[in-house]
Amino acid sequence: MFDFYGNKFTSDINHFIKKAKDRVRALDRDNQRFIEDIFTKGNYRSYGEILENNLINKFARRENVKFEDIFPENIHPALEILIGETNLKNFIKIGEKITKTPYTMGYTRRMVRSSNCRNYIDKLFSVLKTFVHYKFFDINTKKLLLGNCNFKGLEGWDLKNLITSLENKYIIANDIDNGNQDVIDFINEALTSGSSKNINYGTLAAIFVSENKSLLWTNAIISYSFKLFSSKYFKHSLYIVKGPPSLKLIADIIIFFFHTNILTF
């Protein structure tokens, strides 16, 4: 649940956990047990890992497992304590449609595509862990994209390893699907302006996870243009129009080449 190197945040983390346990005392036993299980760990295991493995074993042979089977509504109050009200709403939205997105796993990058949520338990816990970090560091999608996050002095490889361990793509994709115009405009501008800004693999992956066809098409055009730039046909096309390539021009050339079978997707 918390992936940090060294003991830099031991005091802050202990305070975070204590506050959650104090607040959950006012709730029923199911919510109390959930918080206890989340913050139980063994040797060489992070918070939440034992609970995750227990749920994987519990649902190992069950068909048609849904998000609400893994995180039932009766423990939502405990989840709200853990990640906050807004993050909880977004976590539920992500969880309810996470099976629409296949992913790869293991050394062989085996593709996982399933409508059974039991095959996404580890991914759901990664998303939950990400929301815990969002609350701990007071992060949201806009701050993350703009690079305006206060990681309390964490830097270098520790910061890089922390950020790459988070499932930001699902959260960014959810913001796109929720119509967060600030996030959509930022990504669209970064894609079309030629400036990389803070666009990284996770952000590009979020575009494909989301259901925003406009951003997906823009990203596909720009990604495919790399292939075209090395093509003699593309260079000849630019020579003909005698000017810098606009996004529409690239799109028109791609469509023409695709329909004439000069290049294929």
Image (cartoon, rainbow, N blue to C red):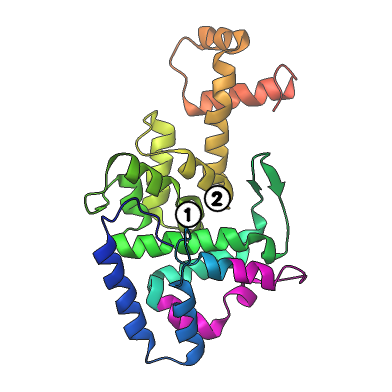
* 39 vs 188, nearest the viewer: 39
Q: 153 left or right of 56?
A: left
Residue topped by disc 2 = 212
Residue 226 higher or lower than 25, as above or below: above
Residue 73 higher or lower than 199, as above or below: below
Secondary structure state at the residue bearing disc 2: loop
Q: Residue at x 57, y 45 (%)?
A: 208
Residue topped by disc 1 = 176
Looking at the rendered structure, the number of numbered marks drawn on it comes to 2
* 111 vs 185, nearest the viewer: 111
Q: In the image, residue 127 lies at what x, y percent? A: 50, 60
**Local crowd size for mark 1, using a 10 Å CA cut-off: few (<14), some (14–19), many (≥20):** many
Is 169 a magenta residue? no
Q: In the image, residue 102 lies at what x, y percent? A: 66, 50
Q: Is residue 157 visible?
A: yes
**Local crowd size for mark 2, using a 10 Å CA cut-off: few (<14), some (14–19), many (≥20):** some
Of the numbered discs 2 and 1, the one sitting upstream in the chain is 1
Tag 2 and tag 1, C-beta contact below 8 Å: yes
Label 1 is placed on what type of residue?
Ile
Q: Is residue 138 visible?
A: no
Q: Residue at x 27, y 72 (%)?
A: 15
Residue 196, by quadrant, is: top left
**Magenta highlight range:** 53-80
Residue 8 higher or lower than 196, as above or below: below
Secondary structure of the magenta portion, mostly?
helix
Q: On the rendered image, what quadrant is the C terminus found in? A: top right
